[in-house]
Image: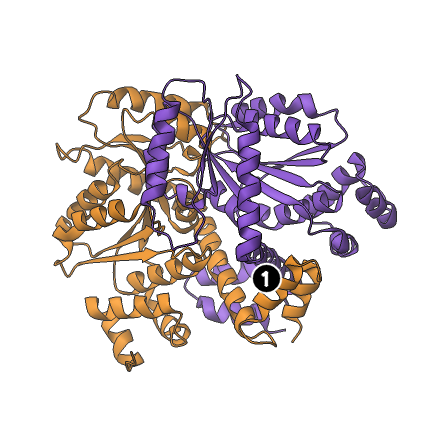
Chain colours: A orange, B purple
Amino acid sequence: MVTTVDPAALVAGVRAGRPRAIGRLISLVESGSPLVPGLVADLAADTGHALVVGLTGSPGVGKSSAVGALVARLRERGERVGVLAVDPTSPFSGGAVLGDRVRMQEHALDAGVHIRSMATRGELGGLAAAVPAALRVLDAAGCATTLVETVGVGQSEVAVAATADVTLVLLAPGAGDGVQLAKAGVLEVADVLVVTKADRDGASGLARELRAMVAHGHREPGDWVPPVVALSSVEGTGVDDVLAAVADFAEHQRRTGGWDVRRTARARGEVEQLVLAQVRASAPGGAGELDRLAAEVAAGRLDPYAAARDLLAR
Amino acid sequence: MVTTVDPAALVAGVRAGRPRAIGRLISLVESGSPLVPGLVADLAADTGHALVVGLTGSPGVGKSSAVGALVARLRERGERVGVLAVDPTSPFSGGAVLGDRVRMQEHALDAGVHIRSMATRGELGGLAAAVPAALRVLDAAGCATTLVETVGVGQSEVAVAATADVTLVLLAPGAGDGVQLAKAGVLEVADVLVVTKADRDGASGLARELRAMVAHGHREPGDWVPPVVALSSVEGTGVDDVLAAVADFAEHQRRTGGWDVRRTARARGEVEQLVLAQVRASAPGGAGELDRLAAEVAAGRLDPYAAARDLLAR
């Protein structure tokens, strides 16, 4: 399908927060369009204001309900909100992910909420380049807050932690999640711990367990101690507590310089992905050159250091 | 500490499978020594023979016991074996990881088994560069099989799947792991599913559940269907079944060309990491140039595409 793009109109549309322009530009980002560098450069001056809040946790923990509740409250405050749902494409999880998306439909017709799903399509590194660019677009569009929801545990956490200004780790009572996640190193990426389904049995016990774990973590004096906050989507309680904890952490980060550290790390990853994309595209043998060299390395006919030198020597 | 390295002696020592030389070279790899490219190039012709088997699963599922049992059986067959334990460094999980390492001590004095822990030290991407290089060293040292054990669920899986020739996902009965992992997309990376603690209640139910999930996954005709194998470290059963499933998958991969696809993907990731390391090191402003540019990008004073162009323009 050939469609024409009017870059000036697209940039103006994104700046004005028009949903179609925003959706269109994110699609261009995902497809790796050659127009993107110019468009992102034009929008650069409009970015740097949005707060990126990552939400992660096991499937079924209530991430989408939490996102829905947070969006509703931020909209009541008159803020424009972005939602980026990052899906690992899995033949096993398709249904569950779709179910989550459907639950967000109540906000789908609100022009002040921009919801976008991004799938990995099995490519490692694909999202690493596209997510930061999509966040830039939503930032330029005036979203004061963008919520990044990841499906799944682990891989996604680290990606969220590398991307978000604030990372919320959600845990539900009764899933035995506390100890499991602690062992898996997931608590380490949490800036705020949210106990979901707080109306259920075991919620206060889980909160106590998490506070004890947090207290036992090694940290330096002055380091942030992740608070444990209870949220009940059923009873509609805890949403303000979560937002207050997010605001507290943001304030801590601004005061300690952690804000700049994290945003610089995010930018570093973004620039690295773009360097690789450019090296791939401008290799002497064309875009397939990296694959050809990798095949030589895999076959033992070339060492990887020589391959890297070859790629850069042009 | 200043120590002198005799490259020729080190290469000869690794080729001869001498534990001290192997350990020394992997330490040089981890420290990013400038000697590494030359040493790896010297060893390139000796590599390409080892089978890399990744093991992953939730904490407590019995990964270390499985690794111990597999090592023992491979040693009975007279094979030289490598073990790479990849640890996410976490203030919460230190004890658990240490416990796992201690369980491997029974093999620590066997000169035919090379055990090495590699920690992430919180740096994303650090392991992405070091693990493939360490695998090369073990390959050149004559390890017919190297087992890569990751601690934790998720992030680690993807790293393993990107690195291993064969990925084993371990699940234990009673942990509610089946459904959780399926939803999290973890089953997708499994070439072989191993039900551990097969002597316990619920093991055969979990195996049935997993077979049903596998049967429902979308795949093309001729695609590999991950077998579900039961392993009991207590009763000492299932080890040969696991190794037979690994051999079946290896044969399938050789026949279908999947072998080359995966090894080429691994080499591609390795070369990309080395390209980035070289770009970082040779940037016009020195090794700190990427950080300086990233800070400009984070502050909104530079767009990321311009930063990537700057880094490459020298």
Where, by quadrant of the figure, is residue B137 drawn? Answer: top right
Residue A93 in view of the camera: yes
B30 with respect to A194 (left or right): right
- Is A242 rendered above or below residue B32? above
B236 with respect to A184 (left or right): right
Q: Position of residue B238 (x, y in %)?
A: 52, 26
Q: Nearer the viewer, residue A268 or B192?
A: B192
Q: Nearer the viewer, residue B28 or B218?
A: B218
A178 with respect to A261 (left or right): left
* Residue type at tag 1: Glu
10 Å crowding of disc 1: few (<14), some (14-19), many (20+): some
Q: Nearer the viewer, residue B78 or A295?
A: B78
Q: Which residue is at a point 32% across and 20% down the rendered structure image? A: A208
- Total marks drawn? 1
Please, which chain is the residue tagged with disc 1 on? B
Where, by quadrant of the figure, is residue A50 drawn? Answer: bottom left
Q: Which residue is at a point 70% across and 31% down the rendered structure image? A: B77
Q: Position of residue A250 (x, y in %)?
A: 34, 44
Q: Quadrant of the N terminus of chain B?
A: top right
Q: Position of residue A267 (x, y in %)?
A: 46, 58
Which secondary structure, mark 1? helix
- Is B139 rendered above or below residue B277? above
Residue B40 in view of the camera: no
- Is A299 rendered above or below residue A7? above
Q: Name the residue tied to disc 1.
A: B289
Q: Quadrant of the C terminus of chain B?
A: bottom right
Where, by quadrant of the figure, is residue B76 drawn? Answer: top right
B41 with respect to B263 (left or right): right
